[in-house]
Amino acid sequence: MDTEASPARRSRHWFGAEGRSGMVYRSWMRNQGHGPEVFDGRPVIGIASTWSELAPCNAHLDRVAESVKRGVWQAGGFPLVFPVMATGETLMRPTAMLYRNLVAMVGEELIRANPLDGVVLLSGCDKTTPGLLMAAASVDLPAIMVTGGPMLNGKFQGADVGSGTHVWKFEAEVKAGRMTVAECEVAEGCMARSNGHCMTMGTASTMACLAEALGMQLPGSASWPAVDARRYETAQAAGRRIVAMVDEDLRPSAILTRESFENAIRANAAIGGSTNAVLHLLALAGRVGVELSLDDFDRLIRQVPTLVDLMPSGRFLMEDFCYAGGLPVVLRRLAEAGLLHGDAVTVTGRGVGTEVADAGCWNDEVIRPWDKPLQAAGSGTAVLTGNLCPRGAVLKQSAASPHLLAHEGRAVVFDSPEDYHAVCDDEDLDVAADDVIVVRGAGPKGYPGMPEVANVPIPTRLLRQGVTDMVRISDGRMSGTGFGTVVLHVSPEAAVGGPLALVRTGDRIRLDVPARTLDLLVSENELAERAADWAEPARSAADRSGYRWLYRAHVQQAELGADFDFLTGSRGSEVPRDSH
């Protein structure tokens, strides 16, 4: 064994150590059948896997990990898979967002504590992607992301159906009496017909695309379906590439720059991406010390049209997007419009502009030309301010109804999503089509965890009258697969005494998206009196200890990405002390 090889590598502090310490580290690794040659100074590559059968979107990542391992071996590295907790929005209660920061904490500490020179991040469901990126950014070892890919297109009664998006649509159809329960049960099995995450432009697909736009994922790899052979081909390529990145010392801090975040924000607008991306990009920027604010999201999208015709904003699905050319086409079109920082470095070591310069589009219906967009420039995520959201709120314009973007109506207020769901089917519910439904108590501290509940269904009585959309306002989130005129992430949230806590049924609310305002039409004196009477909601026993206590005590508000206040910034990859 050559203990002098590559002395600068972190792993040499373990496997190249003399005496008892080195013997302990090497001997225990050999119980897996590794020979002494793996300790010769080659790069040790961790493969951080969020595989879990409790996270259906990630249930195939064990096979993806095998492809990554092949690539690492091919390039002369030593691959080691380790688990990081999976957070599947499909099953976890109250919400996977409650645990995104825990994924980041666990991932960060495991990367730092182990003999790793570089790491491959395997993610799928939407919170695992930002969680692992946040972890890697805080350690700042060479890292590359491999997302698990979307499911194949859903098929029902001869038409394409999208995961998530059609859940809301089918629920409304059943309630309105236009679809039978039996038909809906058949449709359930038609939406998720292969491994992979949501194949709509939900948060999982959005964050996969933005990992690529940020430069943290191999160009062109975000959209390959989970069961396409090229998903495994790109995973193997990532395994080869991370070994080279270790040799080049190419770290997240060199990739995650202000320019790369601007690229990602514009890409999100062009693909009609999820509003959840706002939270995740803000949190990630906080980890690498990049100044990013809600205002940047609104300003940077003003010149960007929605180019990608995907559900929930459009017609197609991720499989179609992939075969049309995927994200490289979108980035090339941004570059040709002068709206891409082409010099921003990617995991390839080259600028993103170079990587997408030759990207070809094979379907202009799915990825629209710049002069024939799905929606006009500025139709991405709008950032609102006003006396109801003094620190901001967001709305996905491309998924909203144009006639409701400037609207004034009577507030109908509910203190929790459960309160609303308890009465939304009531035929005597006092609500009209032009009212504004307010659902509060769903913010980061309030629920806790900021669940995807803001796009509550239209009251059944109104659905039967043909109403398909209403203005809804919440301090919670909306699934990236959702649609409707929904104001999200209202900050400060109701649970900390924000203005949303002071709204009463019967108040008037004015939404003006073109002017970027959201206002409660109540006098300042009246609001001050209500604030004086406000009391913090009582908390359950589960919120008074354990992780939920930690979360509520330290989570920041939405405009800061809902990260923990003690996790902002990078803590580096210094080798921990040896206790042997």
Image (spheres, rainbow, N blue to C red):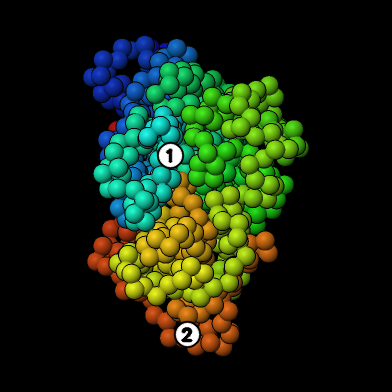
64 with respect to 474 (left or right) = left
On the image, the x and y values in percent for residue 529 come to: 50, 88
| Quadrant in the rendering for residue 505 | bottom left
Of the pair 105 and 85, the residue shown nearer to us: 85
Helix, strand or loop at label 2? It is helix
Name above or below for residue 356 compared with residue 101. Answer: above
Label 1: state its secondary structure: loop
Residue drawn at (26%, 15%) of the image: 33
Report the amino acid beneath label 2: Arg
List x then y, in percent, for residue 176: 37, 56
Q: In the depicted view, which residue is nearer to us: 507 or 218?
A: 507
User: Mark 2 sits on what residue?
Assistant: 530
Indicate the position of residue 22 as horizontal and vertical percent values. 33, 23
Please name the residue shown 42% across and 81% down the image. 534
Marks 1 and 2, how far apart in space?
Answer: 44 Å
Total numbered labels placed on residues in the image: 2
Question: For the residue marked with disc 1, what is the amino acid?
Answer: Gly
Q: Which residue is mark 1?
A: 162
As rendered, which of 188 and 302 lies closer to the eye? 188
Return the residue nearer the eye: 267 or 214.
267
Q: Quadrant of the N terminus?
A: top left
